[in-house]
């Protein structure tokens, strides 16, 4: 699962949003790593639920952005 925190006011109201990702090298990355994923988005079963899943052709580690939070 790749995710980012989004916040509308301050860190206290931050919450995660995410996208399930399946890829050949996914297990090679540590929890908390910043990644760029490229691939095909398909509807698929994920943990018993039918939802969008990114089937990654490539996963690459990237540096943490200067602003790690997303703002609506």
Image (tube, rainbow, N blue to C red):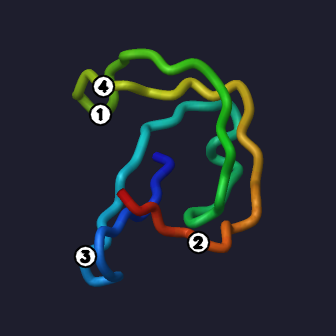
Q: Secondary structure at mark 2?
A: loop
Q: Secondary structure at mark 1?
A: loop
Q: Is residue 66 above or below residue 35?
A: below
Q: Earlier in the sequence, mark 2 or mark 3?
A: 3
Residue matched to label 3? 13
Q: Position of residue 22 (x, y in %)?
A: 54, 31
Evaluate if marks 2 and 1 touch, with contact meaning CB atoms under 8 Å apart.
no
Q: Which numbered mark, 3 or 1, is in the foreground of this view?
A: 3
From the image, which quarter does the C terminus lie in? Answer: bottom left
Q: Which numbered mark, 4 or 1, is in the foreground of this view?
A: 4
Q: Which numbered mark, 2 or 1, is in the foreground of this view?
A: 2
Q: Residues within 10 Å of mark 3 (few under 14, many from 20)?
A: few
Tag shown at residue 51: 4
> What distance separates the C-alpha of mark 2 from that of mark 4?
28 Å
Evaluate if marks 2 and 4 touch, with contact meaning CB atoms under 8 Å apart.
no
Q: Is residue 54 above or below residue 12?
A: above
Tag shown at residue 47: 1
Residue drawn at 65 percent across, 38 percent down: 37
Q: Which numbered mark, 3 or 4, is in the foreground of this view?
A: 3
Q: Is residue 58 above or below residue 63?
A: above
Residue drawn at 64 percent across, 24 percent down: 39
Q: In the depicted view, which residue is nearer to us: 31 or 53? A: 53
Identify the image quadrant of residue 55.
Answer: top right
Q: Earlier in the sequence, mark 2 or mark 1?
A: 1
> What distance separates the C-alpha of mark 2 from that of mark 3?
16 Å
Residue matched to label 2? 67
Residue drawn at 35 percent across, 60 percent down: 16
Q: Position of residue 56 (x, y in %)?
A: 63, 28
Residue drawn at 62 percent across, 31 percent down: 23
């Amino acid at each position: 699962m790749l995710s980012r925190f989004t916040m509308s006011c301050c860190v206290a109201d931050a919450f995660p949003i995410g996208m399930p990702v399946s890829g050949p090298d996914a297990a090679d990355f540590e929890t908390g790593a910043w990644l760029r994923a490229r691939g095909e988005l398909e509807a698929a079963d994920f943990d018993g639920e039918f939802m969008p899943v990114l089937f990654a052709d490539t996963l690459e580690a990237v540096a943490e952005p200067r602003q790690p939070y997303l703002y609506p």
